[in-house]
Amino acid sequence: MNYRRLGKTGLMVSEVGFGGEWISPTDPSHAEKLLSFAEAKGINILDCWMSDPGIRKNIGSALKGHRENWIIQGHIGSTWQDGQYVRTREIDKVRKAFQDLLDLLQTDYIDLGMIHYVDAEADWETVMNTEYISYVKSLKENGTIKHIGLSTHNPVIAKKAVETGFIEMILFSVNPAFDLLPPNEDLGVAFAEEYDASLGGINKERAELYALCEANDVGITVMKGFAGGRLFDPARSPFGVKLTPVQCLHYCLTRPAVASVLAGFDSEAQIEEAVSYETASDEEKDYASVLASAPKHAYTAECTYCGHCKPCPVNIDIAMVNKLYDLATIREEVPDSVRSHYEVLEVKAGDCLGCRSCEERCPFGIKIADRMVKTAELFGA
């Protein structure tokens, strides 16, 4: 398993993470079996947004004696009311539900205290201007949560979170289908039967979010990396083609600032399939060829950092150079962090021979040599 730094939290998280929503609320052995197997495979980050006390209790039992091996994302505002999940900002219910999370997980701290599920502008205003946010900050001050995060599906809200300065990481929905879509407060839009045929390439707001996170050292953990499984079915995929779990994981993990993809698991076989990403070949990870030849919504003339352009005769890391160029040009001024990452590259854009052999391999038809010239001019090397 490979591990990545989760932004300014400094936490090293496994590239493949565990989303706990499919753990049985009634069978403790189910949680114990899955979490034990996942830990053995090197997975060390777990998201627990679920308010169901049965699930929380079973996770807590499974983690007993292993708590220090896990980084837990615990959500603040996910409550259990009258036998069902309710998202709320009512402070008494928020406090009670979060204490319940601690009690049932048998822990006295949560690594990543998540401001739970903010998609609407009105909800953002409520979160940021009521006792709710004071409570979240107090949890951080007394060490009950180690870091403050936020979960959202809306890039507009995610950017607001980054700009606060105190939100250290984001749980965001990332996959090649959702990345096509403009911001929306209704998650149902992302699961529509069909997308507008005019959509193509990464939406500008989403690209700006990834760049903003990278520039501000705000790490991203990913939810809905498989788009609820619809990307595995060509009949349901907005591209009209099938992607594999490994291809979806690779897409997510090639986005700027992404540290871990948290998938929901119901069996050891599903965990094994996801973890196989770590030993997969370039061919098995190749989502780009699939998207480039898809009958609908192809990513044309846009670098997705897939690495098809390799090898370069002078060993330029073309995908990385393209990523840094995009991160630099999406802002009015080149962020210092992006410039420093570029400066440490052993081979830079200015070393390009202009042979264009990489362009023959690019599935998206990008004029790579021209981009190398622009990059060299931008960074001065």
Image: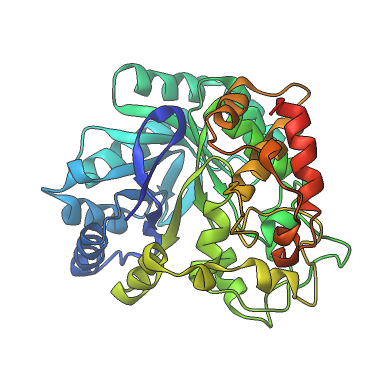
Please report the residue visible at 70 percent of the width from the left and 31 percent of the height from the top: 328
Q: Specify the farthest residue to the bottom.
A: 235
Q: Is residue 291 left or right of residue 23?
A: right
Would you say residue 60 is visible in this rendering? yes
On-image quarter of the C terminus: top right
Tell me the colour scheme of the image: rainbow
Q: In the image, what residue occupies the spot 79% across and 56% down?
A: 366
Give residue 289's quadrant in the image: bottom right
Q: Position of residue 315 (x, y in %)?
A: 57, 49
Report the residue at 78% width, 23% height from top: 332
Residue 217: x, y in percent?
52, 28
- Seen as rendered, the residue at the extreme right is 198
| Residue 96 at x, y percent in the picture | 35, 35
Q: Nearer the viewer, residue 233 or 207?
A: 207
Residue placed at 72% from the left, 25% from the top?
Answer: 380
Q: How many labels were placed on the picture?
A: 0
Q: Horizontal placement of 135 versus 185: left or right?
A: left
Figure quadrant of residue 356? bottom right
**Where in the figure is residue 158, as x and y percent of width and height?**
63, 36
Judged from this view, the residue extending furthest toward the left is 65
Pick whichever, 240 or 107, lies toward us. 240
Relative to the observer, which residue lies in front, 91 or 259? Answer: 259
73 relative to 162 in the view: left or right? left
Viewer-nearest residue: 227 or 53: 227
Residue 188 visible? The answer is no
Q: Is residue 107 above or below residue 302?
A: above
* On-image quarter of the N terminus: bottom left
